[in-house]
Amino acid sequence: MNKAFLFAFTCSLFLFFTACEDPTTVGSDLLDEDAFSLDAASDFSIASTTVPADKVPTYIEGVTNFNSYPIGKYSDPIFGTVESSLYIELVYNNYLNVPNMANSRIDSAVLVLSYDTISTYGQLADIHNISVYEATALPTSDTVYHNDVVEISPEPLGQVALQYRPKDSVRVVNYEVDTTLQTLRPQIRIPLDSNRFNSLFSNFDQVNTTLELIEKFKGLVIKSESNIGSLLGLNVGNTLNDGNNGVNGLYFYYRDSSNTKRVIKFIITDKRWLNFDSGFAAGPYGQVLNNATEGKSLLFTQGFDGPDIKLVFKDLAKMHDKIINHAELEISAAVLQGDDVGLYPFVPQLTIGYKKDGQYFTITDISDLFSALIDIDEGFGGVLKSRTGTPNGTYRMNITKAVKGMLSGDIPNNELLISVQSRAQRPHRAVFYGAEHPEYPIKLKIAFTNP
């Protein structure tokens, strides 16, 4: 192959995909120039629309393994009211002997939870008025969705007001040695009504298994009920770790039948989930949903059950006789009047999927990275980067396999959905310029070979 030609082509691809910023690999198996004509295109017609999300599963038995659970309620100036509550199921600590608590007297009960810095969102200085309720019934299905209704007691079991302080240790009295103070790692401690548990444990000599415990005590619902400007992130942890030396759990400080002071911790099971409502449809920009005209210039996406972005590649068929080497999608972030991205930062990681036969699938450009245990921002992108010529930065995404899937018919109707990665745990949101914005339109760039 002519070295000068190869050098010029390599430079053109470099400039095409990166505008002199980040290099992009387009493949090393290019064949002889005599057999192939090497080219690139970016003049594709794209329709863009903000669309409602489907129901979001926040617990799937045997699959879900979340740690981050943000709770709270606040009014977002762009995306409307956001509200989220945490539901947890408690079980005996199987790593300890199950105590016989019959004829015991509980002096205090405390729910302890860890902070989560990743999912805390909004005004960090807010005071959260947290309330804990007893669940009177739990869903019985293997999958729990974000809007499934759960019956709870009308009055809270416990309440506490606190500020987000993930680095501050706490000082508590050692229950077994009254005069001794202990310094504990940062944590949220919520005192619960000991009378309820004294009543519950009065006949606990017949409750010796987790199933019997759940039958008697369904679980807890944790809310931050003030209409403030943030969500408080909770890290509910790993059941195995918390059973051994972790923090999370419901602690009972009690005296047994011989009046000996004891402490027992019930741990949080893997059956925990968020119930949330993003409220975008009723917010300031709710009218953009399913509005193709509005979607030409502005688009919105949000975690939880907030909206997605639908893209339709209308003239992709012109690439049918081409060999696709690399395809990249570029979408520029927007900041609207009255917004504050310092308080409500952009989405940290976007994902892309599609619907087929009523089911959602992640594009293989991403799922293959998961299978290989590679961070998706490395092989796919989808994170905000500062770009020359755009005021707020741009998200770039490798969709090479997705483009091939659309051309082969595996992805129906040439439609892709952009949404927030890990949306069941992430309240982040972002506004984007649409496909026909006069200055910062969405771009699809394809490097290909002509047979």
Image (tube, rainbow, N blue to C red):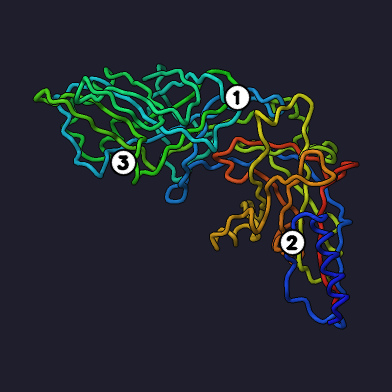
Q: Which mark is residue 24?
A: 2
The residue that disc 3 covers is 245
Residue 301 placement (x, y as % from top left): 69, 39
Q: Quadrant of the C terminus?
A: bottom right
Q: Nearer the viewer, residue 415 or 338?
A: 338
Q: Is residue 397 above or below residue 170?
A: below
Q: Which mark is residue 123?
A: 1
Query: Element type at marker 2?
Result: loop
Query: Mark 3: few, some, or many residues within 10 Å (few <14, many ≥20)?
Result: few
Answer with mark 1 or mark 2, whichever residue precedes in sequence.
Answer: 2
The amino acid type of the residue labelled 1 equals: Gln
Asked where in the image residue 75 lies, by quadrant, the reply is top right
Query: Residue at (45%, 47%) from the top-left corner?
Result: 65
The amino acid type of the residue labelled 3 equals: Asn
Label 1 and label 2: CA atoms lie apart by 37 Å
Residue 69 placement (x, y as % from top left): 49, 36
Q: Quadrant of the N terminus?
A: bottom right
Query: Element type at marker 1?
Result: loop
Q: Is residue 393 left or right of residue 8?
A: left
